Amino acid sequence: MRGPPFRWFEDIVGWGTNRIFVYYGDRTRNTMYIPRQYARHDDDAARQIIRSYPLGALLSVVNGEPFVSYLPFTIARVSPNVILTAHCARANPHWRHFAHGKVLITFRGPDGYISPRFHQDRRVNVPSWNYISVHCTGTAELASDAETAAILRGLVDQMERDAENPWSIDEMDPEVAARLTKGIVAFSVCVDEITAKFKLSQNRSDGDVEGLIRGLRESGSQTDTALADAMALFNA
């Protein structure tokens, strides 16, 4: 993944001096604003987020208006280009418009509220929100019947991989499987660019980050714990 160009300046605000990063890059090639310290130029990390949080928001333009479908995706291939696969209901009109066209798929990893009480000095900090976002742009292509069967199997295998007694698509009655398959449209997306933003308090001191991680874990919330784990992993 390529790094976007930036320049920075000092912004004096009421609670102190913050170094602000402003993006001036090619807006036709970037799908979100990413200050330099939050840019993640690591395809492995981006793929890890997609595998752990596979529900993606697929966006394209339909009749001049944005249209979104929320679908679980599988990484079917990683080289030379990442291939993502998914399926939607045949009744969903979206597939008729994105077929063989450009699409954007966004994935959201762990996120959560960051309270000033977690910082070393709560008098000079304000509330914030940490999150991970991965954007994939590429071209969609509808799947054949044989490819559809493989896409469905791949998705089930991915979702069942950690189960003690995993369910297999082979357990389905063949007639039921054939009937249900007629009601969906499977497709693949050949990804030509991945943009990843990991906003995990990288602009804070080690002591602050340790306090934030500790505060999130002490909240007892599963979502906060997931965010704390991500901060510990990706800030290491």
Image (spheres, rainbow, N blue to C red):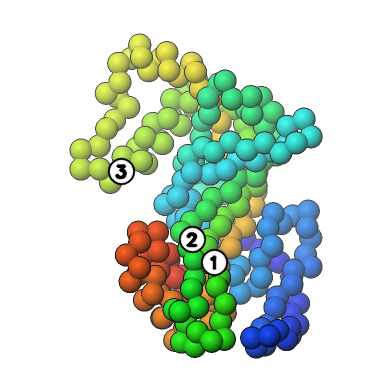
Q: Say which element carries label 2.
A: strand
Foreground of the two, 23 or 131 = 131
Label 3: how many Cα within 10 Å (few below 14, some 14–19, many 20+) = few
Give the image quarter of residue 224: bottom left
Residue under label 1: 129
Label 1: how many Cα within 10 Å (few below 14, some 14–19, many 20+) = few
Residue under label 3: 161
Give the image quarter of residue 159: top left
Residue for point 68% across, 85% down: 14
Q: Tell which circle, 3 or 2, labels the residue nearer the N-terminal end.
A: 2
Could you tell me the amino acid type at mark 3?
Arg
Instruction: Determine which of the numbered discs, if any, sits on residue 3 in the image.
Output: none
Q: In the shown orientation, is residue 196 left or right of residue 228?
A: right
Residue under label 2: 111
Residue for point 64% across, 86% down: 15
Could you tell me the amino acid type at mark 1?
Trp
- Determine whether 152 is above or below 82 in the image: above
**Mark 2–mark 1 CB contact (< 8 Å):** yes
Residue for point 37% across, 18% down: 177
- The answer to whether any part of residue 144 appears in the image is no
Q: CA distance from mark 1 to mark 3?
A: 32 Å
Quarter the C terminus occupies: bottom left
Q: In the shown orientation, is residue 117 left or right of residue 142?
A: left
Foreground of the two, 101 or 129 = 129
- The answer to whether any part of residue 228 appears in the image is yes
